[in-house]
Amino acid sequence: IAAHEDYHAILEVSAVALDRARAIDTQLKAGKKLGRLAGIPYIAKDNFLTAHTHTTASSNILKPFKAPYQSTVIERLEAEGAIMVAKANLDAFAHGSSTENSDFGPTKNPADPTRVPGGSSGGSATAVALGLTCFALGTDTGGSIRQPAAFTGVVGLKPTYGLVSRYGVIAMGSSVDVIGPLANRVNDAALVLDVTSGKDIHDATTIERDPQAYAGGKPQTLKGKKIGLIKEYMGEGTEAAVKASVEDAAQRLAKAGAKVEEVSLPSVDLALACYYVLIPAELSSNLARHDGIRYGHSSKQAQSLAQTYLLSRDEGFGDEAKRRIMIGTYVLSSGYYDAYYKKAQKVRTLLIREFALAFKKYDFLLSPTAPTTAFKLGEKNQDPLSMYMSDVDTVAVNMVGAAGISIPAPVKGLPIGIQLIAPQHGDRALLGAAKALEELLA
């Protein structure tokens, strides 16, 4: 980590990591039974509540904050002996697609330091790509695990909504937020899912996990599997190199015995607009708790209670957080609720139905993870609409609660991600197919 500080992937190194490692060494020498991840280092995105480190969500409004408890995911990993060695940079409050929205400075792409690593889990993806950790934790609200995985050439898994507890993770859009791993191999991501998934009494949205293990199994046979290549993600706006990589993956899948054919999901063209109505609405509510009173930054210039609210939030939140708070508050206001929020929920229902129909015919769906390769630092951070388009291939998966994974394509230039999608609760099948595709692409 110290040797790669120039990439600015890490915000804070754990002061107790080496002590925990020594304790595990002692237990190992004593012949004690250890957990499945004993001694394995990992890095957590800095929106996970963790002991012994700060939790800032890369925002000045939380800069001095130390959490009073740990997230369920961190607790489950540590119960199996995994050691959190550091906290990773992100777009502040996970609002972004490039990790340039961090209040503490952008992260650089390991493949080309002049380019972004994607976002919002850009620090986590970069840490894995640089070899700073065996795996890293990320959050995926509209593609924030899969898109940076694609930009940096690693594996990024977005499980079914509710499969992994969100307790102790700073909320963005509560109806779509998902916790997942970034790793170098599909089976590594599957092992992390084995440890972290399942019901949690602290999170009412959690669901039962598959009774069989997600990791360790053989790659799923692809013979006879039906795979739909999403037409809308292969058209205008998709770079030629990205399109060629996805077509190459489709050909390899077909040679392995899968039946690959084009499928149209007409409403996915509306998914991004739908997302940027519903998610700002949810996050404007979630960010209301940062008021300068209970924890985090409190303005020293305030002379009254009202000024404490106004100045603390003005000083603490960055431009993107303010933009999304204003959009979200606007679409929930009495005069515009029906015109925007209610209509977007109807579009979301339409998306859910279209994906459900597609999965009646196909076992999996195939697409690019992102329409382009990593763009230059500073290229899009003054153009919010252009930045939002970076997630055009991933947001629909979140809106319908499905499972998705990004696998790196075999390219010599900038990394490209191949996205495989499965229906809700299809995570084990998805991982089996992803292992098979990983071998085909090797």
Image (cartoon, rainbow, N blue to C red):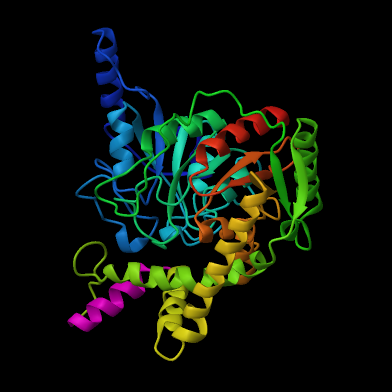
Residue 180 figure quarter: top left
Can residue 117 be seen from the camera position used here? no
Between residue 315 and residue 354, name the one nearer to us: 354
Extreme-bottom residue of the structure: 335
Q: Position of residue 139 (x, y in %)?
A: 45, 50
Can residue 279 be seen from the camera position used here? yes
In the image, 369: left or right of 15? right
Q: Main secondary structure of the magenta part?
A: helix
**Image quadrant containing the N terminus:** top left
Question: Considering only vertical position in the picture, is 313 above or below 46?
Answer: below
In the image, 413: left or right of 39? right
Q: Would residue 96 be counted in the magenta stretch? A: no
Between residue 45 and residue 157, name the one nearer to us: 157
Residue, x 40% and y 69% (percent of image)? 282
Q: Position of residue 12 (x, y in %)?
A: 36, 43
Q: Would residue 306 be counted in the magenta stretch? A: yes
Residue, x 55% and y 62% (percent of image)? 352
Between residue 87 and residue 406, name the one nearer to us: 406
Magenta range is: 304-318
**Image quadrant containing the C terminus:** top right
Residue 184 figure quarter: top right
Residue, x 49% and y 49% (percent of image)? 121
Q: Position of residue 33 (x, y in %)?
A: 27, 14
In the image, 194: left or right of 246? left
How many numbered dots are placed on residues in this image? 0
Q: Position of residue 101 (x, y in %)?
A: 49, 61
Question: Considering only vertical position in the picture, is 15 above or below 288?
Answer: above
